[in-house]
Image (spheres, helix red, strand yellow):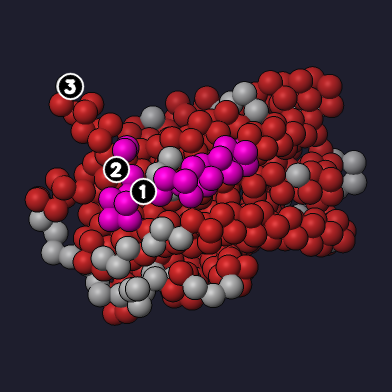
Amino acid sequence: MSEQAKFLEGSLLRHIAVMSLTSSVGLMAVFAVDFVDMVFISMLGKAELAAAVGYAGAILFFTNSFGIGMAIACGALVARALGAGDEESARQRATTSLIFGVAFGAVFAALVWMNLSWLVGLLGASGETQQLAVHYMQIILPSLPLLLTGMVGGAILRAHGDARRSMNVLIIAGVVNAILDPILIFGLNLDLTGAAMASVAARVTMAGLALAAIHRHHGGFAQPGLSGLAADFRPVFAIALPAILTQLATPVGQAYVTRAMAEFGEEAVAGMAIVGRLTPVAFAIIFALSGAVGPIIGQNAGARNEERVRRTFFEAIVFTLGVTVVVSILLFALRPSLSWLFQLEDGSIARTLVFLFAGPLSLLWFFNGVLFVANAAFNNLGHPFYSTLTNWGRHTVGTIPPVMLCAWAFGAPGVLIGQALGGVIFALVAFFMARKIIQETGDNAPEPREPFARQARLMNLFHHRR
């Protein structure tokens, strides 16, 4: 057994808790900075600034999804190689995944850059709010390759079971952002420009620290070469392509929700933006769950230990339930503090939306957690397109009709209600699909050194037909 494959023995619930909690601390540091950004911008007392951040956030979510997809692919391949005892292959896959991610991410960022005004307008922004959102995005978008480097680097660290260093990378980047935010926003009176510049500095920090940690503690990277890139192109994108498509479903659904909320005015969009920044801070553990559970499933699948794969899945679901209940109780208790922090006026739409989330809707986040765990199982057991199917279903059929119906029935609060209700059905569908895949894995386990061979063969066949 490879010394790097630490999840092949020991308490699974402990592995899940440690990986999720340490990963969530790092994520919370990043999300908390976004949250503080919104607090500072709310203090400026201009609804158009908060609304601009809301519109820009929907597009940034779209661009970040590319990096999340590449990180999922890299983490799955590296974890399974380590579980199979092939550390050289793990190093090679880490190298090629990082190169592909940065290269394609730069192209992706350029395409979004050229269509920024149209994209922001498509979400419902107009006038000064549209101009502010575009300006904010123009500063942040060029740093997307750096963000991808940090994301993929973090996935490599987690695949090695090094959640602590992955966490530290995000914490330090978050601290850099948090220090620069008040200096640039208030000290230099740069408003949105200052917030964007602080985010870029954090991305530079995250990329540098992630690469340094991998080099110092996990053997670094393999020598890049055309032969290695060509050999790994299909295995990487056999997972990355469906993973990226899976992640893109979320911002597409969020874009529709933003457009639907825009019908109720800038104050409603500002309230939704507050909820959007509060959600990942409150549920950072749930957001971290997919990336945390993935390496545990991947290593045990690579070692062909089907019973531990099955137990990891079910114990992660139980862990999700416990986290959701505790966080929901805390959110409800913190309602008065949230109202004061964001200067929400009694009877305002923004206050109604924030209080709706910090109450009954937060309990429904359990189902999002179920979907995250199921996607981790799909991605690490050789069925990444199942993640694509369930995620797109959840953010199209599971978002558009219920949002339309609930918005018609309840107004602005109905937008959030419909978005939450749509996730319940697809989480249940994903749960039963994942359980079936895990059972099939136990009956007919894949060869550990050829992960995702079926997807690679399909891509190879497609290539030859072309």
Q: Is residue 452 magenta?
A: yes
Who is closer to the viewer here, 438 or 190? 438
Residue type at mark 2 is Ala
Query: Which residue is at a point 79% across and 44% down the rendered structure image?
Result: 361
Q: Position of residue 194 (x, y in %)?
A: 50, 58
- Label 2 secondary element: helix
Q: Which residue is mark 1?
A: 446
Mark 1–mark 2 contact, CB under 8 Å? yes
- C-alpha separation, residue under disc 1 versus residue under disc 3: 26 Å
Q: Earlier in the sequence, mark 1 or mark 3?
A: 1
- Label 3 secondary element: helix
Q: Earlier in the sequence, mark 3 or mark 2?
A: 2
What numbered label is drawn on residue 52?
A: none
Q: Which residue is mark 2?
A: 453
Residue type at mark 1 is Pro
Residue type at mark 3 is Arg
> In the rendered structure, which segment of residues is drawn in magenta?
430-455
Q: Position of residue 351 (x, y in %)?
A: 82, 45
What numbered label is drawn on residue 465?
A: 3
- Label 1 secondary element: loop
Figure quadrant of the C terminus: top left
- C-alpha separation, residue under disc 3 versus residue under disc 2: 18 Å
Badge 1 local density, few (<14 within 10 Å), some, or many (20+)?
Answer: some
